[in-house]
Amino acid sequence: MSPTTTEESWSVGRRWLGILAAVLAAANLVMVALDLSTGDVETTGDVVLAVVRTILVGTFSVQALYELRARVLVDDVGVHHREMRQRTYRWEEIGEVRLYSRWGENVVELVRHDGESVRLPRSTEHLDVLRRRHVAVTGRPAS
């Protein structure tokens, strides 16, 4: 391991939910394939059930992708939050990195200079990393 790292990243998705969704998608896909290959789709109810299972395959697949792909990457440019697409928040745009608490849940917030805040899910254990990097890059004291 190198003594200095230029970037750090962590997963912010709920891995357990992503795996569960992938298993449910696979199970429904197997059921649809078995129904279609054995010729068990005869009545209108069977067709409806096959269509519903196909929709479930798509829904659970998207949910699995969303949860397993979600990540935060921190580097010298800024904070890159990737879910279905990646958003970059440059350090120059961020005025404050703070902990936000509501209804017993702690969330890290990146507050931009224009007052808009961006919440990073499941990142509270990395609050010190975000604050250190913000101070190191911008030269402004931590808030």
Image (spheres, rainbow, N blue to C red):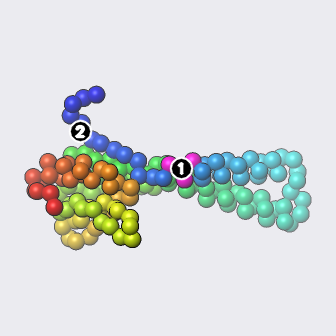
Q: Are marks 1 and 2 in contact (CB under 8 Å)?
A: no
Of the two numbered discs 1 and 2 in the rendering, the one whose residue sits closer to the viewer: 1
Where residue 42 appears, as percent x and y from the top left, is 90, 59
Residue 65 visible, this angle: no
Other residues around mark 2 within 10 Å, as few (<14) / some (14–19) / many (≥20): few
- Residue at 70%, 57% (x, y): give it: 54
Q: Which residues, given as a range, are shown in magenta?
A: 15-19
Query: Could you tell me if residue 96 is visible in this image?
Result: yes
Helix, strand or loop at disc 1? helix
Name the residue that disc number 2 marks.
6
Quadrant of the image containing the N terminus: top left
Amino acid type indicated by mark 2: Thr
Depth order, front residue of 91/110: 110
Residue to which mark 1 is pinned: 16
Marks 1 and 2, the one that precedes in the sequence: 2
- Which residue is drawn at the image coordinates 20% and 70% (left, top)? 114
Q: Residue at x 41, y 47 (%)?
A: 11
**Is 111 situated left or right of 26 in this image?**
left
* Occupied quadrant, residue 94: bottom left
The C terminus: image quadrant: bottom left
Instruction: Looking at the picture, tell me which residue is in the foreground, 66 or 98.
Output: 98
Residue 113 position by quadrant? bottom left
101 in the magenta segment = no
